Image: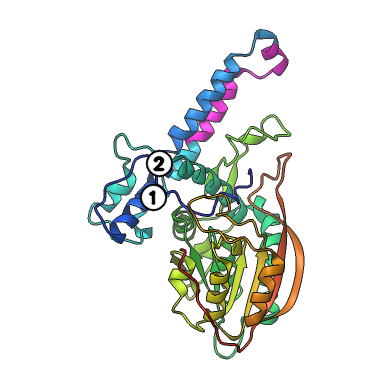
Amino acid sequence: MSGGYAGDCDEETDSEDHLDMGTGPDAEEKAHFLEVCYSFLEYGSDAFYDLERMQETIQKLDAQDMAMWKVPAVQWYTEIQKRVQVNLEFLRLMPNPEVCGADLGPSAWEMVATVPQGHRVASRNSSKVRSTLRQFVRDWAKEGQPERQASYQPLISALLKHLPPKRAQGAPAVLCPGCGLARLPFDLVRLGYAAQGNEFSYHMLLGTHLILNRSEKAECFNIFPFVLSLANRKGRWDHLRAVKIPDVCPMDALGPNAQLSMAAGEFVEVYKHQVGAWDGMATCFFLDTAKNMFLYIRTIADIIRKGGVWTNLGPLLYHYADVPTEVSVELSWEEVRPYICEYFDLVEEEEKIARYAGNTAGLSVNRYRCIFFVAIRNDKPIRGHSNPVF
């Protein structure tokens, strides 16, 4: 799927070449984090493999075909190669030991910056690097503004209406789980909320850290997110266009007292003990990342206070549906809705169309019919429990 949404559910931990970090949860976390760091550093190897394959294909064209194409083969290859190198230099900025959920020790910087000899990056992690480049367009480029308007603005408008940021008891605390590169919580903080983003993917967390903490000015980075995407082009050189990020410098846009935070980890595991701690929640393309929707809904109901607001927009694609080794309970909206209504009063509900990390210049666009709703937490206590599947 060219939009990247279907493949963004999880990280690859079972790579072809495991890192030996000892045993125990902390060791597993270190190894997983380093796998992600190395996938950024090895983008060049992965990209040039594809580029060499493209070059071999072109060399099989005969002289008449080449004359019809009217594109000099050497120039074609060189222009792509130069942009792949720019992407690689940008992606080399990603690995940062501060983001790891475990202590990497005194050699942390050396560990994240040097790929061990002979190490092979899992194909799914390589794919995730490319989808992360496209995610930067969605969240932090001017080109992504239409997507943000369709996906984030309904949630923001709902919170402004039902949970205004200015109130006597201080800024409302709003949680944005599955926030990707954190644009939604960033925009909420600019409006006066105390927002926290939650993200499971280290690819997203490393990208967020770069944008929020190391962007010196607006549009300080050039990336070429579509350079290897040759299908569905309208213009001959559309895949070579640069995208500048971020469209706004977060350090300039947020004042010293801005209440923006990030929490890394699986949503249920991170928040399961924060009973009634949140005034609001904004979920965007998040609910169908659940392996068990009942567990998600019960957790959300548990952590939002009575009278708190939950607003949601997204489809029901179910990210784990095609993963044979994972639990995946795939419910229809007709089945999900009554369980939400046990703990919430739906005050708004409709379908909205939204795209996800698409190429605006391409001939193919993935459009999702999304469920949008606004729900107010009632006073019904949580009942039952689910088997842990995270």
The one of 54 and 328 positioned closer to us in this rendering: 328
Pointer 1 or 2: first along the chain = 2
Q: Secondary structure at mark 1?
A: loop
Image-quadrant location for residue 174: bottom right
x 66%, y 47%: residue: 358
Residue 211 to residue 121: above or below:
below
Q: Residues within 10 Å of mark 2 (few under 14, many from 20)?
A: many
Q: Position of residue 74 (x, y in %)?
A: 56, 18
Q: Main secondary structure of the magenta part?
A: helix
Q: Residue at x 33, y 51 (%)?
A: 31
* Kind of residue at disc 2: Leu
Task: Judge whether 281 appears above or below 28 on screen.
Answer: below
- The location of residue 61, given as percent across then percent down, is 63, 13
Q: Quadrant of the N terminus?
A: top right
Q: Position of residue 186 (x, y in %)?
A: 56, 66
Residue under the point 34% across and 57% down: 29
Question: Which residue bears the numbered disc 1?
Answer: 95
Q: Which residue is mark 2?
A: 41
Distance of label 1 from label 2 (alpha carbons): 8 Å
With 86 as the anchor, is 343 left or right in this view? Answer: right
Does residue 300 appear in the picture of this structure?
yes
**Which segment is the magenta one?**
65-85
Q: Amino acid at mark 1?
A: Pro
